[in-house]
Image (cartoon, rainbow, N blue to C red):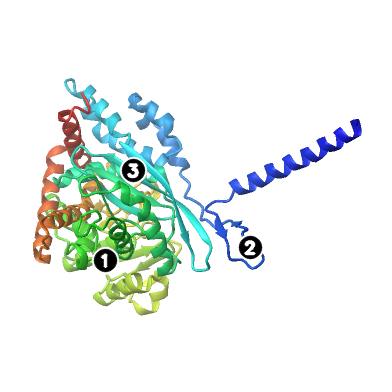
Amino acid sequence: MRSLLMLLLAVLMIVVTSVAASAHNYKSCDNPTIDTTSPSTTQNKIRIVPTSTKARPTTTSTMTSIQGGDSASNRFPFLNDLRRKYQHQPVFLQAVEEMAIALEPLFADPQKGEFYQRAFVVMTEPERTISFRVPWEDDAGNMRFNRAWRVEFNSALGPYKGGLRFHPTVDEGILKFLGFEQCFKNALTGLPMGGGKGGSDFDPKGKSDAEVRRFCESFMTELARHIHPSTDVPAGDIGVGGREIGYMYGQYKRLTNRHGEGVLTGKSILFGGSHIRPEATGWGVVYISKLAIERQLGRSLEGARCAVSGSGNVAQYAAQKLMQFGAKVITMSDSNGVLVFDDGMTQNDWNEIIHAKQVQRARLHTIEDKVSGRYVPNESPWSLNLELDFAYPCATQNEVDKDDAESLVKHGLNGLFEGANLPTSMAAQQVLRDNAESCPLYIPGKASNAGGVGVSGFEMSQNAQRLQWKPEEVDEKLQELMSNIYDQIVSAGDTLENGSNRAGFIKVADAMKQLGWVY
C-alpha cells in the first residue's frame, strides 16, 4: 500500500509540473495566433502560435526624470501619488510633468493656487477607460487578437473627442498621454469638445486590405456601444486613415442602422466627411508658425530652410503648405531613414512621396531613384546636423532628444513647431528654453497641431446641419481658428510654450468649477 501511495504521489507531481510549464508558456505568448487550419492538427483542436512583436521603445530616462531624478519633478509634491500609481506609464507622466512646469505660476497664485492644484490632479485621471480584446482572422484563416482601449478623459467642454491609433507601441499609458494632451488642445479651438483617445496595438503595416477590414469591423463591433455624437466622437491618428475610418463607419452603420451621424470624423466626402480634413493638421501647424515668424521675428517663410519629420498625413501636408509659402523643405522621413533635399523639395518630389505613402503604402527608400533628394538610412532629420531655420517634428512622441535639440540650436535653428504630439523630450524642451534668445519660437503640439481636431469639429457641425461646406470656406475657418489660438497663447503666457499650456488648462478648470466637478 505504501508503495502504491508513493507511485501516485510521483505521478501527481509530474502532472502538476507539466501543467505549470504549459501555463507559463501560454502566458509568455504575446498577441497569440489561434491556428485552426493547420493540417497537422486534428479536428476540433486549437493550436496557440505566438505572433512576432516589435520591442517597445525604452523610456528609462523619462522614468528617472518623472520619479524624482531631477529637480523639476520635485517641485510638485501634490503629484507624488500620481507618480507612484502610474510609474509604469512614463510617457503619460512626462506629459503631466511638462504641463505642470508651465502651470507653476498658477499653482503658486495666492488666491486660486490651491484650486488650480486640485483641478489639475482631477484632470490627470480619466473619467472612464474602456478596454477590450479585438479578435480577427488573418488571410491564412488563423484567429488572432489584439488589445484595444478607449480613454474618455474629460467631458467638461463637450463630448470626448480624439483619434484612434493603431500601432504596436500602443498601450493604456500612451493613450492616456494622448488623451490628456487632447483635453487642452480641444479647449484652445473654442469648439464644444472634450478630450479622449483610443486605439490598439494592432499594426496595419504589412497587412492586406482584407485583414485591415476584418480587424476594423471587429474593433467597431465593441466600440459602437460606447460612441455617439453627444458622447464620444473618435477620429484617425497614426495607423488610422481614410481606409480604416471607412471600414469602421461601415460596420457602425450595419450594427446600428443609423446613417449620417457624426460618430466618427475623418470620413470620406461621400458619406459625411469634410473638405480639408486630411490636410488640416499639417496646414494648421504651418499657419500658426507663419503667424509667429512674421509677428515675433519680423521674417517670412519665403526661402526659409525647414525640416519636416515623418511622411504621414501631417508631414505630407505641412510640407505642401510650406512649399506654397515659398519655404525650402529639406527633409521628410520614416522609421527607416530620411530623404534629404539639400536645395529644397520640388513639387514632383512631393507627388512621388504622396503616391508612395497614400497609394503604394511603401517606404521612402523605395523611391530614392524617383526624387531629387538623397536617402540616408537609419537616421532622423534631427541627427544629421543640417543647417535649418525652422523644425517641424511631425512623426511621433519623443523623437527630438536633448542631443538633437543642442545640434539644432548650434546649427542656427530659430523655431520649432510640433506637428506630432509631444515629439520633443523634456530634456530637449529645456534646451530650447535655455537657448530662447537664439531660438525664440517653440509652440507645443497642443496649440500648433490643433488644426486637425478643429476641422473635425467643423465636420461634426456639418453632420449636425446635414450640410457640406465648400473647401474654401473650411480653409478660411481653419486659418481663423489657428489665428485665434495664436492670440490666446500670446496673451496667456510669457512665452508661446507657457501660453499654449495655460490657456487650455484655465478653460477646462473654469468649466469644471462651474459644473461643480471641482471646488
Q: Secondary structure at mark 3?
A: strand
> x and y percent of residue 113 in the render?
21, 24
Looking at the image, which residue is at 19% across and 36% down? 508
- The numbered mark, 2 or 3, whose residue comes first in the sequence reads 2
- Alpha-carbon span between mark 1 and mark 2: 59 Å
Q: Quadrant of residue 331?
A: bottom left
How much space separates mark 2 and mark 3, taking CA atoms? 40 Å
Q: Residue at image x 32%, y 48%?
A: 225
Q: Nearer the viewer, residue 107 or 224?
A: 224
Give the amino acid type for the residue marked by disc 2 in the picture: Gln
Determine the CA span between mark 1 and mark 3.
36 Å
Q: Is residue 124 above or below residue 376?
A: above
Give the percent coordinates (x, y) of residue 222: 37, 51
Q: Earlier in the sequence, mark 1 or mark 2?
A: 2
Residue tagged 3 = 151
User: What residue does disc 2 label?
Assistant: 43
Rendered image: mark on residue 502: none
Mark whose residue sits in front, 1 or 3: 3
Tell me the mark number nearer the camera, choosing from 2 and 3.
2
Give the amino acid at mark 1. Val
- Image-quadrant location for residue 110: top left
Identify the residue shown where x is 17% and y is 68%.
324
Front residue (pair 505, 331): 505
Q: Give the label, 1 or 2, closer to the camera.
A: 2
Above or below, comparing residue 235 to residue 67 in the picture: below
Q: Mark 1 — residue?
A: 329
Q: Residues within 10 Å of mark 3 (few under 14, many from 20)?
A: many
